């Protein structure tokens, strides 16, 4: 195997450099070595230390940001970017094996017997960017109680826990799950909809306006497909009261033709890395000298902008 020397920076706190999504992926084709003087840097959007590196820089974010090719040579983001230096990598790819979202023909009738609760909601905090999903929660609750198990608006008498497994276990008895993103941007699809799918809830989704090619929209309720919010709520209540209609949704695969979408393909990602690692370039870090700021400046910048995730998530 070819040896590739990598480093990581500007990720979230306690990011494991030696064992993460990228190193596990790349180990299928490369011998990966983590070192301070790498051949390539993979960095995220939670700091400024990437500016110290003169090797080729590969930008990754699971948040809504777009790549800035004045600072990076290549990028993986959720955005739709028509540029060979970029490959779309939605956040949900990190969260679930696609096999868990592939339905089998025996599921619908079994699920119909198990789904004995109405609708679930999980949100950690209140933020101006979560206003749309908070408002929708309150509007739906006027018709029928929605059970909220997160830290904010909790109405079930206790917290469900912070792990993904705890969230999935909480969602499983429910017919529906409010799965709103914190913003609506083309391409920005996070784990919210796939968490609902994994628990076999019908997702009530708002977010990526171009989600239809990724997932079968007949398997969930997509907010923009309705003329107004009341029409969406009427449809939710109609499905809740009609087992035959509910079964129609359960029988719909989450993926088109019940086959995982292209973004789950490891070969697709590895092929992009093959191109990155085999293409000689003059890195942006070596060209743009004004990015070579001192470490003390970066420390000050990091203190002013600490590496925390989007508070609305």
Image: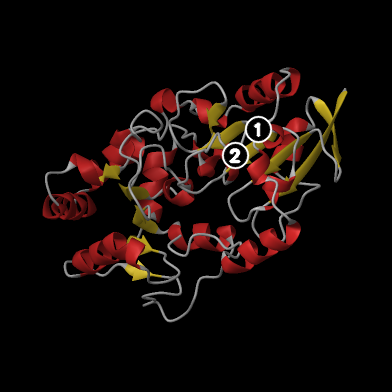
Residue 55 visible in this rendered orientation of the protein: yes
Packing grade of label 1 (10 A; few <14, some 14-19, many >=20) is many
Q: Quadrant of residue 272?
A: top right
- Which numbered disc covers residue 284? 1
Identified at 35% across, 60% down, the residue is 116
Q: Is residue 50 left or right of residue 111?
A: right
Badge 2 vs badge 1, beta-carbon distance below 8 Å:
yes
Earlier sequence position, callout 2 versus callout 1:
2
Q: Secondary structure at mark 1?
A: helix
Q: Is residue 61 left or right of residue 3?
A: left
Front in this rendered view, residue 275 or 211: 275
Q: Position of residue 119 (x, y in %)?
A: 32, 61
Above or below, 198 against 29 in this view is below
Q: Position of residue 73 (x, y in %)?
A: 63, 31
- Which numbered disc covers residue 215? none
Q: Position of residue 133 (x, y in %)?
A: 30, 61
Front in this rendered view, residue 270 or 202: 270
Front in this rendered view, residue 253 or 291: 291
Above or below, 256 against 66 in this view is above
Above or below, 73 against 122 in this view is above
How are the colours assigned in the image?
Answer: secondary structure
Q: Position of residue 89 (x, y in %)?
A: 54, 35
Identified at 44% across, 27% down, the residue is 258
Q: Quadrant of residue 42?
A: top right
Q: CA distance from mark 2 to mark 1?
A: 6 Å
Q: Mark 2 — residue?
A: 71
**Which of the image's four quarters has the N terminus?**
top right
């Amino acid at each position: 195997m070819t040896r590739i020397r990598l480093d990581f920076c500007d990720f979230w706190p306690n990011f494991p450099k030696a064992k993460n999504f990228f190193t596990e992926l790349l180990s299928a084709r490369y011998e990966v070595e983590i070192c301070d003087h790498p051949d390539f840097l993979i960095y995220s959007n939670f700091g400024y230390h990437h500016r110290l590196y003169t090797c080729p820089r590969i930008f990754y974010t699971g948040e809504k940001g777009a790549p800035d090719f004045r600072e990076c040579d290549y990028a993986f983001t959720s955005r739709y970017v028509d540029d060979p230096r970029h490959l779309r990598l939605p956040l949900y790819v990190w969260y679930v094996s696609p096999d868990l979202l592939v339905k089998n023909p025996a599921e619908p009738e079994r699920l119909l017997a198990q789904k004995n609760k109405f609708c679930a909601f999980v949100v950690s905090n209140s933020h101006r960017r979560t206003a749309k999903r908070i408002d929708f929660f309150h509007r739906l609750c006027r018709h029928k109680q929605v059970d909220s198990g997160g830290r904010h608006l909790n109405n079930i008498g206790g917290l469900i826990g912070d792990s993904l497994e705890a969230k999935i276990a909480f969602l499983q008895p429910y017919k529906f799950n409010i799965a709103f993103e914190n913003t609506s941007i083309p391409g920005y699809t996070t784990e919210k909809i796939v968490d609902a799918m994994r628990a076999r809830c019908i997702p009530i989704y708002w977010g990526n306006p171009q989600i239809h090619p990724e997932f079968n929209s007949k398997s969930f309720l997509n907010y923009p497909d309705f003329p107004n919010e009341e029409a969406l709520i009427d449809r939710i209540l109609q499905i809740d009261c009609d087992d035959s209609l509910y079964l129609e949704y359960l029988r719909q695969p989450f993926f088109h033709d019940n086959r995982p979408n292209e973004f789950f393909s490891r070969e697709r990602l590895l092929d992009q890395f093959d191109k990155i690692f085999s293409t000689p370039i003059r890195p942006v870090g070596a060209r743009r000298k004004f990015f070579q700021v001192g470490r003390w400046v970066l420390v000050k910048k990091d203190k002013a902008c600490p590496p925390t995730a989007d508070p609305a998530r």
